[in-house]
Structures are given as structure tokens and as C-alpha cells.
Image (tube, helix red, strand yellow):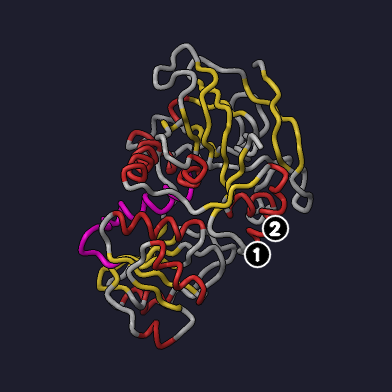
Amino acid sequence: METLETKAYGTESADAPIQDMNIKRRTVLENDVEIEILYCGICHSDLHALHNDWGATVYPIVPGHEIVGKVTKIGEKVSKFKIGDLAAIGCIVDSCGHCTQCNHGEEQFCEEGWTLVFNAPDKHIGGVTYGGFSQTIVCDADYVLKMPTFDDLAAAAPLLCAGITVYSPLKHWQVGPGKKVGIVGIGGLGHMAVKIAKAMGAHVTVFTTSQDKMDDAKRLGADEAVLSKDPEQMKAQSGFNMVLDTVSAKHDVNAYLNVLAVDGSLVLVGLPNEPLEVGAFNVVNGRKSFSGSNIGGIAETQEMLEFCKTHNITADIELINTSEINEALDRLEKGDVKYRFVIDMNS
């Protein structure tokens, strides 16, 4: 298969900085779309992958899975897009397309395994896939989203991961008017969860370890904020139908199981490196459940984009130049961002 080179930003090893590199993209196939990347968010999972925290990284790696851009080429069978359209790509760029889960629009649970936008086996040209820290990307049109015309397109880029990661479980657990919802952590995921849960009509309480973020929770739309390291404040909490846990570090989940109502669910979307301990009595007492959720399918991601456009929801971001990627990654590792870095790929 023919390939073309494009400029990208990646690394050759876990302890090397991001640097300029040239990567290969396939030429456009009959159902493909080529996109000039305008903006790409930086997710905490990009950092985990760069550092090989999960033990599966193949180097060189080009991360990035919150991609917004403009269509520059289309294959002869593509009718969904035309040249010049805004388009977006999230985590998923391929799946089997015929298993039960794919047929139900849940490609993220593909029984044969879905293809991640970066660091997954590339079925077309071999090697691994390369992500959105690059100038262009080529993808099957079935996995490309139609991007609404947000007023701040850069701030909408994190919706492609952070947005769908919280939208999907909030929808699945039927969050809406009359529901009491807790959000654990205000970071890239948590701040989006507050905005989306509130737009769905829920009563939203934020749990945070940071006094500074207590006030910010109200700015984001939360009805209440709880300092989770204060035992007295935690003791006063109860009756939550759902608690969405966005924390990607080891923490005590039992504290949040204890605030659930009967039949309530604690749903994990963060990805801690270490196992979490769950006390049996904390789930047995009250018929509670501890669950997880993983992004969302293509159709649901499109639905989420339209929902966020309707409700004027975007991420709180810091827009950076490509020369600032390493600095941003260092700050992200220290938790020094409110609440998402987005790279201007034309900078």
C-alpha cells in the first residue's frame, strides 16, 4: 500500500522527551477521510502511554486521541463528508464491524478488539497506529465524527475523550432530573462530568481533596462541593443514586460506596495503576454496585457532541503551541492544569 509522510510529535522511549518526527500515513482508500489536524487535546492516558505505565507501549509512539480538524481528501465511496468539512476523531479508528457489540453501536466493546487511534496494530500498513500529535491523519469514515461548529473549536477537542468518557456512563445510569449524582475529582474528566450531569438535570455534588477546587466546583455548575479528606463533611453525605469516580490514582473507593443510596452505583472511569480494595459489606449493605465504563461508541460520541453543542458545553482549556508539549506534559504529571491542555497543531 502507498504511504505518505507527515510531520508528527512523538518519542522513542519512556524517558525521552517529545520531539519532531516524520511518520507514515496510508494514502486515502475508497472509504477513507484525510484530515488536517487543527487541534488535539492532551489526556492523562497519553501521559501513561508515553511512560509505558501500563506496560504495552510500542516505541516510537505518537499519542493524541482528542482530534479536531478539517477534511482535505475523501475516498470515492465516502458520502458522509465533503472536502472542507469539520471532522473529529476520538479513541476508536477501527473495529470488526460485525460482532454483537459493534452491531449495537458499542465499538469500544468489540469482541474481536477495536483499534485505538495510537499504539495499536495498524491493519493497513503494519507497525502501530499514530495519533493526533501530528499534522494529518487518515481514517475510515465510519469512525470519523461530524464536528459541530462550536464557537471555541479548540475547547471542544477534549469532548472526544473526556466528554464521551463521562457522558456515556451518565446516560447509561439514567442521570437526569430527580437524581442525586456525585463526581469524584475535578480534573480533565471531572470538570466535564459536572457540566454534563448538570445539563442532564441532576443535582450534582463534587468530591475533591483540594480546598481551591471547592469554589471552582460551583463555578462549573455543581450544586454542592465536599472536601473528601474532611471526615465530618463525608459523614454528612448520603442518598446518592450514582457517584462517578474520575480519579486515576490509588484512593479509597469505600468512602464513596458508603454515600450511595440503596441500589446506587459507584462507576469508575479513572484508570489507577494499582488495584483498588473494596470492602464486601460496603456493597452488600444496600445492594450497591461498583462498576466501570469505557468511552463510548461512535454513534453515542456523535450524540454527545450534539448534546454539548446544544447546551454550549466545552472544556476549560489552556491552548498551547507545539513547542510547549513537553512543558505541558510535565505540568500535567504534577496536576498543574485547569483543566485540559489542547495543542494548536498549526502553531
Question: Residue 138, position in %: x, y?
Answer: 57, 26
Stretch of the chain drawn in magenta: 160-180
Q: x, y percentage for residue 297?
A: 40, 40
- Crowd around label 1: few <14 · some 14–19 · many ≥20 (10 Å): few
The single residue placed furthest to the bottom in the displayed view is 232
Q: Are marks 1 and 2 in contact (CB under 8 Å)?
A: yes
Say what secondary structure mark 1 lies in: loop
Residue hosting label 1: 334
Q: Residue at x 44, y 18 (%)?
A: 82
**Residue 96 position by quadrant:** top left
Q: Is residue 169 left or right of residue 121?
A: left
- Which image quarter holds the C terminus? top right
Q: Report how far apart the C-alphas of labels 1 and 2 lie in the structure.
A: 7 Å
Of the 4 image quadrants, the one containing the N terminus is top right
Give the vertical position of 254 relative to 327 (above or below): below
User: Label 2, on which residue?
Assistant: 330
Q: Does the stretch in magenta take in 36?
A: no
Which residue is drawn at the image coordinates 34% and 33% (left, top)?
A: 103
Q: Quadrant of residue 58?
A: top right
